[in-house]
Amino acid sequence: DFPQFEAAGALLPMPDAVSLCHTMLATGLSSPGAVAVLLRSALREPLIHVQDDSQELRLLKAIEMLIRVDFLYTQEQLPPEVTEYLALIRDLRFYDRELRRDTTLSYQLAFFLRKHGFPAKRKMLGPYALKVCDPEERINFEPVEERSWRFGMVEVPVARKKRHLEALGWRSIEVQATAWKGLDYDAKALYIRKLLKENELLTM
């Protein structure tokens, strides 16, 4: 029982508390009491000591997003100091180094989209790096790389990212590496035109 552990003074260090809280929420466990205890443990560490590209801040950003989008009941039950802490987390700058690391897919996707007038900018949104997006129109093209996920996951990260973006009013259009890599130059250009037309982003 987390509240009993807290009353006994058994508080986890900030990195452990953040990691456990994120794991719980990402797997669908959202007990308000447990979340409050873990985040109270985390907030003992001043945020000024947390680097803007750290794993702890990435997880805190993900926790804030999960609570705000997926666990409204939990959010309503949190004590004021934890709610204020999450508001600070939401406003903090987080930088994911992956934002500037292009893959073959993300680089080529941006190249072909720009040829059709799509800005293909980069932006951080909460814990998420958007490599090919239009921030003003809230449109994201998500390059989905080939990757195997751990068996039994409640929701794979790519699906969660898409769902969270859409909950925040974004359109997220996925481009699969498995489909992209087999196309030549002309086929890729046609693929992008078709994708833009299907999503009503190209009228010609």
Image: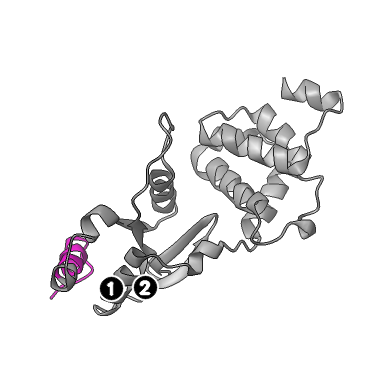
Q: Position of residue 15 (x, y in %)?
A: 72, 43
Q: Which mark is residue 113?
A: 1
Disc 1 to disc 2: CB gap under 8 Å: yes
59 over 7 or under it: above or below: below
Q: Quadrant of the C terminus?
A: bottom left
Give yes or no for residue 195 being in the magenta stretch: yes
Specify the segment rendered in magenta. 190-204
Q: Quadrant of residue 157?
A: top left
Q: Regarding mark 1 in the picture, which secondary structure is present there? A: helix
Residue drawn 66% across the image and 60% down it: 92
Q: Position of residue 54 (x, y in %)?
A: 66, 56
**Kind of residue at badge 2:** Ala
Question: Is residue 132 positioned above or below 170 on the image?
Answer: below
Is residue 53 found left or right of 2 in the rendered image? left
Determine the residue positioned at 59% across, 64% down.
95
Per the image, the residue denoted by label 2 is: 120
Instruction: List the single residue furthest toward the right.
Output: 9
Task: State the residue at coordinates (65%, 39%).
Answer: 19
